[in-house]
Amino acid sequence: MTDHRKNALRGKSGKGHLLLSEADARQKKTHAKDAEELPENQGCPGTAASEEAQFLEHVMAMAKDAETFGAMAVCIDAADTVCIPDEAISDIAGIIEKICKKTGGAVRMTERGFFGAYLPGADEKACRDAAEKIGAQTAKRTNETVSIGISVYPTISSEKKDIFENARKALAHADFFGPGSIVCFDAVSLNISGDAFYQAGQLDEALAEYERALALDPENVNVHNSIGVCHGDREDWDSALASFNRAIELDPEDAFAIYNAGYIYMQKEDYEKALGYFQRAMKTDDNIFELLFQTGRALYELGRLDEALSYLRQALSKNETPGNLVYRAMGDCNMALDRPDEAVKAYNRALKQRPDDAHSLSALALCYENENRNPEIALVYGENAVEIQPKNGLFHHRLAMMYFSRNRYEEALTHFETAIDCGHEESGRYLENAKELISGTEAQKNAAGS
């Protein structure tokens, strides 16, 4: 059996790999193994709630006056993929029961292939010794392996009733190490549990898990980074920066926290500072898709267009399914460099990835309009863009200019006015001209009628 000590899990397995990102390729998904941590499915896969509740009630009665005790969540590793023979399950149940009952404990199989165990008076070492024996005897007698999560009472920020849930979280933690693993509940277990909530979009629950993790390990870099990511997703930029900067203080070479801090400065539109963080992160790890992408974006905002394109191309080389935003950014760079053909190619690729990308629709419409090609498609794309994002002043302005060039002044006026309402002040330069042309057209009609 593999024995994983506290904080053995770092870097990518401990949540540090989750970055703040706009790239569509990184969609939040709930891994099947992580479902154990979500409120609607607490416990192990397929656990009958009544079985688990009955066992927990029984154990809490036994532990009512206990000052210390241990809990184990034991899972036959192959139980969720193959049908384990009844004989093997019976043998494993007997092994667990025999070892745990030597301490006066209790065991119950709450779901086929999954066992909960209570060890009165046991500390972490005693639980680990028992887990090692269970694993060794199981392998010898049945050729099966078991993974085991361990939790003990007392544990900081946990009540007695939490100990079995903690053991399940340690079991989910063990899943990262493969079959036959033993893990004792720690801050990393909570970090992984928080990740499951985060991937499900449950930020409040994720943050609560990360805060509990921080209580166990106040200097855990990944936990500070995780908390920062939650604040960043809520657009609480100052709180996010505080968490990322604390992570950087603890580990000045943590590329993930450094990148995330840079991302926050991108949201604050402080592109020079953002670029500085990205370049610093690059010295530690220059192989991260989001880092290359955001570096390209920062360079674009700073007018360093050729450099921006170079980083965007590097980002594409790191991700086979980069989503639309990288292609969109490449289109913007090429448009700014007066390379319309390359811009058109990039925007079309962006739209192939995501047909409702309003930015690319509007920009592609502008490219077609400027090059005097596909005028009908240009107008349709411009109209589609404002339908998708009706509060974008730039998109309304571009559409208004298209109508204006086609002598459709009333429609142009409507979109110039909307653009101004949305904060696009440049439209004010054209507003009066459109009104004058409309008045002139009406005067001509009246004169002809008389």
Image: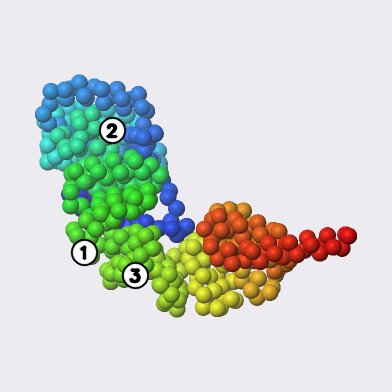
Residue 98 visible within the image: no
Instruction: From the top left corner, tell me how far across and down residue 350 is, in percent.
Output: 55, 64
Name the residue at 78% across, 60% down. 442
Where residue 154 sits: x, y (%)?
Answer: 14, 34
Residue in front for this viewpoint, 18 or 204: 204
Between 165 and 373, the one lying in front of the other is 373
Of callouts 3 and 1, the N-terminal one? 1
Asked which secondary structure carries label 2, the reply is: strand
Residue 101 % position (x, y)? 17, 28
Residue at mark 3 to residue at mark 2: CA–CA distance: 55 Å
Disc nearest the viewer among 3 and 2: 3
Q: Is 381 drawn above or below residue 137 in the view shown?
A: below
Sequence-first tag of 3 and 2: 2
Residue beneath disc 3: 272
Checking the image for residue 252, the label placed there is 1
- What residue appears at the point 75 percent right and 64 percent down from the top-left corner? 440
- Image disc number at residue 115: 2
Q: Label 2 sits on what residue type?
A: Phe
Query: Three-letter amino acid code at disc 3?
Result: Glu
Q: Amino acid at mark 1?
A: Pro
Sequence-first tag of 1 and 2? 2
Identify the element where label 3 is drawn: helix
The residue shown at (19%, 60%) is: 249
188 vs 449, nearest the viewer:
449
Q: Is residue 67 above or below residue 299?
A: above
Tags 3 and 1 in contact by the CB under 8 Å rule? no
